[in-house]
Image: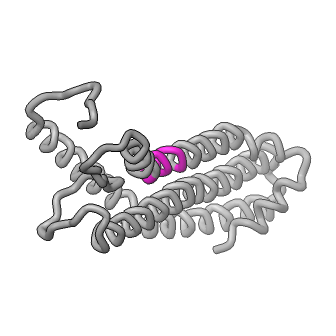
């Protein structure tokens, strides 16, 4: 099922262009905003430990604390500035890059497919509004187009259903982990002084 060629053909029709593209600009802006926020937050996570280390060097701190981008506890010891620390840091950089790539590509792609299907539904609505009792060919074309859209819907559900389920499960696990971490904190300090 290829929606792109048919969608391009619909956009070339001046009667349908405004109806088909209604609401696309809003979701395009939201997609760019999601990509920008994920990119900025990923860079903050990656660069914060480096900036903290540079700050400690600049202020001549004796025992420098080497932080990882994501706080975690591992069953093996990670020596400061050792090989294992660098491996963990590089791994977490790649994990952040993967998170950015997947988040800013999968969600807008789903929106694109949805809008292509919505555009075809709007085009069918336009055609059905223009139809009369003698034009059986247009009606047959709308029915065939509708069956194609239902096949596309089934494909989208098959592909994106597990992805959405995985994201919901991951979000629940992350929230539970954060709540657990908050219960382990003895006190919350807003400003922490470096020794």
Above or below, comparing residue 131 to residue 81 in the picture: above
Instruction: State yes or no: residue 140 in magenta.
Output: no
Horizontal arrangement in the rendering, residue 65 relative to residue 185 (left or right): right
> Where residue 141 sits in the image (x, y, percent)?
74, 65
Residue drawn at (60%, 63%) of the image: 149
In this rendering, would 68 be left or right of 157? left
Q: As rendered, which of 105 and 152 lies closer to the eye?
A: 105
- Towards the viewer: 22 or 97: 97
Quarter of the image with the C terminus is top left
User: How many marks can you see?
Assistant: 0
Residue span colored magenta:
39-46
Give the main secondary structure of the magenta stretch. Answer: helix
In the image, residue 151 lies at what x, y percent? 55, 69
Could you say where residue 26 lies in the image, as x and y percent from the top left?
66, 37
Q: Nearer the viewer, residue 183 or 158?
A: 183
Asked whether 42 falls inside the magenta stretch, the response is: yes
- Considering every residue shown, the one lying at the far top of the view is 190
Q: Residue at x 39, y 47 (%)?
A: 57
Q: Residue at x 56, y 60 (%)?
A: 105
Which quarter of the picture shows residue 180?
Answer: top left
């Amino acid at each position: 099922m290829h929606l792109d060629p048919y969608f391009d053909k619909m956009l070339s029709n001046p009667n349908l262009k405004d109806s088909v593209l209604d609401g696309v600009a809003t979701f395009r802006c939201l997609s760019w905003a999601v990509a920008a926020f994920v990119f900025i937050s990923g860079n903050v996570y990656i660069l914060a430990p480096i900036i903290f280390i540079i700050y400690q060097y600049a202020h001549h701190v004796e025992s420098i604390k080497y932080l990882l981008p994501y706080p975690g506890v591992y069953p093996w010891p990670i020596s400061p500035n050792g090989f294992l620390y660098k491996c963990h840091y590089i791994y977490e950089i790649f994990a952040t890059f993967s998170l950015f790539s997947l988040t800013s590509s999968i969600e807008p792609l789903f929106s694109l497919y949805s809008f292509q299907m919505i555009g075809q539904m709007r085009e069918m609505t336009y055609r059905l509004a223009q139809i009369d009792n003698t034009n059986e060919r247009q009606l047959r074309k709308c029915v065939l187009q509708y069956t194609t859209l239902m096949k596309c819907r089934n494909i989208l559900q098959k592909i994106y259903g597990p992805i959405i389920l995985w994201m919901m499960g991951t979000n629940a696990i992350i929230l539970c982990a954060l709540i657990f971490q908050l219960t382990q904190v003895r006190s919350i300090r807003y400003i922490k002084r470096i020794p």
